[in-house]
């Protein structure tokens, strides 16, 4: 007997894929039976040959494969596994060929809440609704009995560590650190057609068994960041065979996938890059396989959800944005609650940073040299170490962490804001690293000596004037920018000087490129004048590459990696 849990172990060791229109059909002694755990239509079998001569739909099949060969064959399907043993496989009627699908689609769901009333000790169970969607927090309403007195001022607010509920489709939901805002109680002379209370929460965890959660700690994260494939040189498909003409006219197509994933470990955390794959093997006029990468992070000790998100998901997103130079997105996120155990279900996370649109590498796209500043496998770099290094930079309050913000530097931001933030980043990095401290120390020494000699001959107002107006530092923005340009393996000064805006300011004012940048910054910061937005945007794009190169340097990466964002001719 192949149970649903056994299939989940064979499928991906942790989760059930969501396939449109559905019901699980595990087999008992070779015959399918209904199992209403997930809304899908599927036939599951175990063994190297299909128990059904003609499955209900022969168009598509989904399964993650640790390695093996997929070939075009006739008759029943045979899918080899790395161990040589038979594998569990899923027939499915699918609406999409994306390998990675969310458990709970966007939408509005009826639900029943479980709301503790601390005053009475009772657990109230009113009905309500929850709106779940990508890139936004959950919106929840309550219609029914709620905590609090029926008189007094409204709204009344109650804060909880978590609140649970059950969706009408059977899935559970848990809201983390929610606030219940009560506008009134039912049964009075005031009606509440949209609900008499609202629940505000930044995060909802949705999935099987979520309504039973009593602890917000987690032990595992499954996350996908857009363009994750850009940071790897090697493809998960290691070989392909294309057909050659034979005398019989028959053609054979095949693809072989890797049997191992990329894994990094330290004393308490492991990070693994794996792939979900979708194969179309029984369509009459189509045959192929598609894969998409995702990351699994496991902790030896449970972590609070928000701590785990800040330390690992948000930091991973920032590091990926530095590596690719794009404003990357969290496209998919699931977590495993600590109390669910090692084999418990993963819960889908709904929150503002998560788009709920799993990423799929573009069909037929040829990798480019500037896709990423490094290739983790080719350069032998640990993504886990990069994330931990970024965490250390945050603890040190390094300026690059707070100024190289993908959202603030995105192409949809105003060029003026991008330019000012990038100049601030370069100035802050130079100041944080005390790169000009020897020059500054020598100046301060000379400053003190000259001031002391002047005081011998000055009195009253003259002495106060000299003390107040003799510059205390010899370092200005020009020096900071020149220092930042010289400290990179490729000097970007020439490229900056070629931009239309800097070239014109240099010609009009007789300044060097760093002096022109200072003048433009001062004009914009103090509102003296404005500049052409497209020209300012082109300049900001060059400066962003400079800041990105410094971010790579601060992450501890070599000069070859630092030079790649500065290859402006690529």
Image: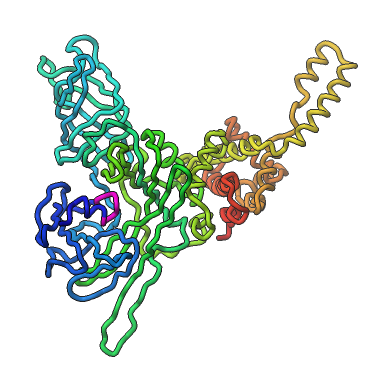
Q: Residue at x 32, y 85 (%)?
A: 245
Range shown magenta: 10-16
Answer with the quarter of the image where residue 65 lies.
bottom left
> Residue shown at 34%/64% (left/top)?
67
Is residue 541 in the magenta section?
no
Q: Relative to 159, is 146 on the left or the right?
A: left
Residue 322 image position (x, y, % from top left): 51, 47
Q: Position of residue 255 (x, y in %)?
A: 34, 70
Image point 50% across, 56% down: which residue?
376
**Nearest the eye: 87 or 295:** 87
Residue 44 vs 421, above or below: the answer is: below
Q: Is residue 463 above or below residue 567?
A: above
| Residue furthest out toward the top | 152
Whether residue 535 is visible, yes or no, is no
Please determine whether, in this image, residue 468 is positioned above or below residue 506: above
In x, y percent, where is residue 247? 29, 90
How many numbered marks, from 0 up?
0
Which residue is more in the foreground, 41 or 285?
A: 41
Q: Is residue 311 left or right of residue 193?
A: right
User: Is residue 344 left or right of 368 when viewed as pictured?
Assistant: left
| Observer-nearest of 398 and 325 | 398
Q: Is residue 506 left or right of residue 251?
A: right
**Residue nearest the observer in this picture, 557 or 190:** 557
Q: Quadrant of the N terminus?
A: bottom left
């Amino acid at each position: 007997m192949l149970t649903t849990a056994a299939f989940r172990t064979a499928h991906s060791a942790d989760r059930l894929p969501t396939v449109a229109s559905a019901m699980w059909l595990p087999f008992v002694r070779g015959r399918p039976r209904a199992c209403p755990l997930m809304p899908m239509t599927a036939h599951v079998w175990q063994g190297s040959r299909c128990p059904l001569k003609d499955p209900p739909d022969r168009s598509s099949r989904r399964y993650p494969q640790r390695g093996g060969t997929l070939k075009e064959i006739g008759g029943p399907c045979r899918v080899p596994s790395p161990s040589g043993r038979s594998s569990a496989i899923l027939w499915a009627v699918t609406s999409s060929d994306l390998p990675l699908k969310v458990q709970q689609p966007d939408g509005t769901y009826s639900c029943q809440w479980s709301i503790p009333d601390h005053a009475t000790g009772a657990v109230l169970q009113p009905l309500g609704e929850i709106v779940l969607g990508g890139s936004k927090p959950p919106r929840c309403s309550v219609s029914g009995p709620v905590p609090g007195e029926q008189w007094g001022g409204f709204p009344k607010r109650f804060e909880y560590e978590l609140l649970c509920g059950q969706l009408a489709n059977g899935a559970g939901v848990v809201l983390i650190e929610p606030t219940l805002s009560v506008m009134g109680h039912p049964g009075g002379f005031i009606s509440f057609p949209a609900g008499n209370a609202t629940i505000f929460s930044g995060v909802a965890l949705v999935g099987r068994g979520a309504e039973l959660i009593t602890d917000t700690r987690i032990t595992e994260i499954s996350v996908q960041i857009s363009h994750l494939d850009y940071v790897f040189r090697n493809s998960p498909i290691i070989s392909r065979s294309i057909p050659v003409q034979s005398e019989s006219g028959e053609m054979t197509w095949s693809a072989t996938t890797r049997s191992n994933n990329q894994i990094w470990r330290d004393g308490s955390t492991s990070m693994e890059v794996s792939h979900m794959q979708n194969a179309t093997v029984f369509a009459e006029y189509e045959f192929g396989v598609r894969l998409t990468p995702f990351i699994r992070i496991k902790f030896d000790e449970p972590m609070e959800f928000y701590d785990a998100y800040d330390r690992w998901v948000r930091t991973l997103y920032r590091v990926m944005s530095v590596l690719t130079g794009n404003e990357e997105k969290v496209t998919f996120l699931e977590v495993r609650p600590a109390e669910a155990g090692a084999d418990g279900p993963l819960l889908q996370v709904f929150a503002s940073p998560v788009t709920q649109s799993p990423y799929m590498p573009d069909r037929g796209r040829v990798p480019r040299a500037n896709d990423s500043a490094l290739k983790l496998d080719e350069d032998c770099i640990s993504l886990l170490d990069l994330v931990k290094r970024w965490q250390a930079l945050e603890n040190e309050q390094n300026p690059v962490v707070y100024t190289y913000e993908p959202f603030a530097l995105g192409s949809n931001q105003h060029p003026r804001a991008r330019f000012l933030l990038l100049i601030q980043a370069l100035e802050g990095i130079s100041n944080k690293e005390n790169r000009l401290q020897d020059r500054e120390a020598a100046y301060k020494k000379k400053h003190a000596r000259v001031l002391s000699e002047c005081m011998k001959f000055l009195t009253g107002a003259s002495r106060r004037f000299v003390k107040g107006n003799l510059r205390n530092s010899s370092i200005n923005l020009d020096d900071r920018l020149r220092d930042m340009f010289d400290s990179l393996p490729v000097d970007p000064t020439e490229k900056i000087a070629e931009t239309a805006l800097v070239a014109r300011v240099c010609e009009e004012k007789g300044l060097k490129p760093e002096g022109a940048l200072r003048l433009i910054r001062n004009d914009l910061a103090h509102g003296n004048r404005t500049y052409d937005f497209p020209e300012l945007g082109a300049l900001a794009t060059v400066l962003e590459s400079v800041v990105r190169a410094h971010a790579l340097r601060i992450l501890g990466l070599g000069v070859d990696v630092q030079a790649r964002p500065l290859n402006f001719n690529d």
